[in-house]
Amino acid sequence: MPLKLTDWDQDLPIEKDEEYQAFIRTLQFTDGFSILFVRCSPAEGEQLISQVKADIHNQNIEVIKLDKDVTNLYAIVDKLPNKNNINILFITGLESSFYKYEEAKTLAGWSSKETHHYSWESVPPFLININQQRERFRDSFNICFIFLLPQFAIKYFIHRAPDFFDWRSGLFDFPLDSKTLEQEATRIIQEGTYEKYANLTNEETNQKILEIIDIIEHEIDNEQKAELFFELGYLQRVRKNYEEAISYYDKAVEFKPDIHEAWNN
């Protein structure tokens, strides 16, 4: 039976609509244990969950929302009272487990002098745990797990939990639309102040840096890209990472040669 387009679908660009339809088909034909990864922003993830619930009526859909560092996802799922009746389980907020680790600094462009060498000591315990327990997930849960994550967190899984990531049944991409991108870029630029950045913890600084980089990696105009690189430089300057700040200011000038803020720093 053909899928019925909802109002949300009608607003999607063709490519995004095709991705959503492929995602829905995958969910409808998935039976039992499987792992799906979705690259999206938190806001896009919330919208996606609501839409899937509206379009799929014959499966039990649940959501785990994480807002802090976790170590053992298996234990969290195992404690769900209705775990044996869940068909689809969305998991959001796992990126919260990554912000405080040194590798996040590398992904955010920090210098190698400020990061630990790549070893299991620098990997979040969550990823070590999930990599080691993938067989337990398969044997214990008859569930389709869907991990909603931003780009940098997807990279974490690829490089730091490759065994678990290799078990995926699919990887779907729902980038921000142009209007939302512009709104997010404008919000970041307008909200950035010395007082606000100076009061951020190291974890919050990493989170902000990665949030900005995620916007920059989308298709945005050069002026906004320059302003966002300036914000990255400003963040590093506030944290007294002057070498990295200069590097970001140089990138800002590259995209907008007349950006006076960068020239003055």
Image (cartoon, helix red, strand yellow):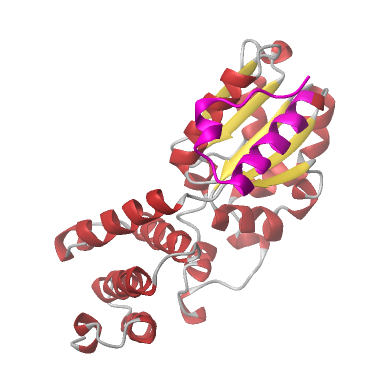
Q: Main secondary structure of the magenta part?
A: helix
Query: In which image quadrant can residue 30 be found?
Result: top right
Query: In which image quadrant can residue 79 be found?
Result: top right
Across and down, in percent, residue 73 comes to 63, 34
Instruction: Look at the image and say whether residue 8 sits in the magenta stretch.
Output: yes
Horizontal side of 139 relative to 240 (left or right) equals right
Across and down, in percent, residue 127 comes to 65, 48
Figure quadrant of the N terminus: top right
Q: How many marks?
A: 0
Across and down, in percent, residue 162 comes to 76, 54
Horizontal side of 108 relative to 148 (left or right) equals left
Horizontal side of 38 relative to 229 (left or right) equals right
Residue situated in front as seen by the camera: 167 or 44: 44
Q: Is residue 199 above or below residue 222?
A: above
Residue situated in front as seen by the camera: 12 or 203: 12
Figure quadrant of the C terminus: bottom left
| x 50%, y 58%: residue | 101
| x 66%, y 66%: residue | 119
Horizontal side of 95 relative to 119 (left or right) equals left
Residue situated in front as seen by the camera: 255 or 193: 255
Across and down, in percent, residue 11 comes to 49, 37
Query: Where does the magenta region start and end?
Result: 1-28
| x 51%, y 31%: residue | 8
Query: In which image quadrant can residue 196 be found?
Result: bottom left
Instruction: Look at the image and say whether residue 236 sits in the magenta stretch.
Output: no
Residue at the extreme left of the image, as rendered: 195
Q: Is residue 46 above or below residue 208?
A: above
Residue situated in front as seen by the camera: 199 or 59: 59
